[in-house]
Amino acid sequence: MNDNFDWKKYLIVFFITVGLFATAYYLSEYFGGKKVEELKSIQDKIAIDILSSETQFSLLSELSCKNISDSVFSGQLGELGNKLEWSQNNLGATEEVSYLRKYYSLLQIKDYLLTKKISARCGTKASFILYFYTTAENCSECERESLVLLSLRGKYPELRVYSFDYSTELSAVESMLKIYKIKDTELPALVIDDDVLTGFRSIEELEVRVKESFKLQETKPIENKESSP
Amino acid sequence: MASISGLIFYILIFLSVYVQVFFFVTFFENRKKIVIRSGKTKLSHYPAVTIVVPCFNEEETVEKTVRSLLNLHYPKDKLKIFLIDDGSTDGTLNIIKHFEKYPNIRVLHKENGGKYTALNLGLLHSENDFFGGLDADSFADPEALVRIMSYFEKDESVMAVAPSVTVYNPRNLIQNVQKAEYHMGVYLKKMLGFLGAINVTPGPLTIFRKKVFDDLGPYKHGHNTEDMEIAYRMQKNHYKIAHCNDAYIYTNTPGTILKLYRQRLRWIYGFINNTLDYRNVLFKKKYGNFAFFTLPTGIISIFSVGYLFGRIVYNVGDFLYSRFVDFQVAGFNFSREFGNFDSFFINTKMSLFLVALVYMVVLFAMMFGRRMSDGKWKFSIEMLFFFPIFSILAPLWIMRAIWNTIFSKVPVWR
């Protein structure tokens, strides 16, 4: 009776739609892959920076601190952190992203150790905060603390915040947790000048601590000079 | 929970893309059949037509409506016009009485009973083989009727012909956005016409063979959408409805959000309830594309809009909450809010490409619809405004219409 029904057309349209979906999937994978590549290249660059700084430090350890260039402080570490966090949220917690996050944690620890060494020896102005949080469970305090630290870092460019996901399965991170006796029930946790602060800390409170920390750093070179032969 | 929501999201996107591709393929198949005439159309003979103008409190527009009928390029002795006052409480009756002096115009007055009762009164008095209505807020292009009638001349099996309805004199953003939407409507209606699956024979100047009403009975209340109900009834009885894309009707559209809300609530409520009334038509092969495409498309769009609205509300709420927390803990930081742009942070999710694709096809529909009704391929900024404005407003009337259906509340006309 009705000649206006054509199964074939419904099927053809179905296949076209599937084709469009496949194309969209391919594009999404393609751009996602590009982003992961970009992350990898930033990480490689940071790794080289750190290695180069370490080498420079070893080479010059017997000489003057003046020769240690400013580029020691790799500003890209923060940028990489932001991009990784975004990737975790938007590309999904894929194997590649979680691998990159582990690598990032390791780079942070290396950067932390090196900067601490340089700063102690040469008195460069730097303040550290180690920040422990978790993504394994819903931690609203952690989200608030992250925002505080982000804001603080904007205010004090020299401030270095190293953030570690409690659930990262990496022995180096686990050692850090052991050293500072961080428990997963007390997150977020901050380490400033070897003091462990647990729970949410406001921006005002941290600012005071950071300022103290700056002064502490500034006074050290004099002590160093005095103690050095 | 998140994965179920994600799955529903992708199913709805799949269906939306499917619908748009279906329209586009239909367009591609039939593009050579779309004729846009200019100049005067001639018929080999001019059948007698009755046009009814049902009026209820339309004193501001009815005179122009009647004048547009008098200016139609159609032999005066073949065109009978009934002006039916449906118990207006304003000056409508006085205005239409002035037209009694025209030999082909007849003025009738009745107690208020709703638009379908006025149309039925016209049907009762009509002796011609062709019958149509023209809403008293709409104006016909002089060529409209003769072009519509050419479709009947060309094809004996055509039982009704719907025109292209566009927006008359849009003055504000809401009306301009509707103009873009009506242009899309022209395109979609033409495609549905090719598919034999039109589900509305709009109040502004759809012409029927009188036989339709003789066979199927007069207009019904149809949940205040009598022009949808009659189309459903015709589809159920395999009566062919065509769309004459170059017959132009200009209609007044709601100028405020509230008026638009009331109109659309009535339309969507009409769609839901007429579809419920005719649910036994759904997915029956003998009812063709109407059963497999038009009705499912309407149902899908209701679900999609409702679902997407929930999702958008959730996302916006989530975003505002995180901004609030940010402000609470760290204060306002200009440089962070509007910091350096980095292409890395452009989202490249799969859904984004698909949504962009749907928007592009809809934009094409608007532009081609505009070409069919204004004769020009032209982009206008209102076409872009359509997306945000309708995605905020449409969920409101859709959800209200669902609510009203569940609690059997019939929306008022205006």
Image (cartoon, helix red, strand yellow):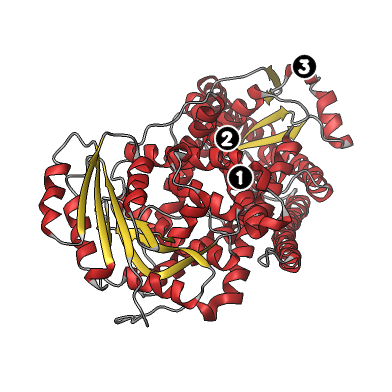
Where residue B322 sits, quadrant-wise, is: top right
Q: Position of residue B212 (x, y in %)?
A: 49, 56
Residue hosting label 2: B310
* Chain on which label 1 sits: B
What distance separates the C-alpha of mark 1 from that of mark 3? Answer: 49 Å
Q: Residues within 10 Å of mark 2 (few under 14, many from 20)?
A: few
Q: On the picture, is B341 further left or further right than A170?
A: left
Q: Nearer the viewer, residue B265 or B78?
A: B78
Q: Quadrant of the C terminus of chain A?
A: top right
Q: Amino acid at mark 1?
A: Ile
Amino acid under label 2?
Gly
Left or right placement of residue A85 versus residue B147 in this view: right
Tell me how far mark 2 sits from mark 3, CA to CA.
34 Å
Left or right: B255 as drawn, with respect to B383: left
Residue B378 visible within the image: no
Residue under circle 3?
A: A185
The answer to whether tags 2 and 3 share a subunit is no
In percent of the image, x 31 and y 49: which residue is there?
B253
Q: Earlier in the sequence, mark 2 or mark 1?
A: 1
Q: Both on one chain, marks 2 and 1?
A: yes
Residue that carries the numbered disc 1 in the rendered image: B299
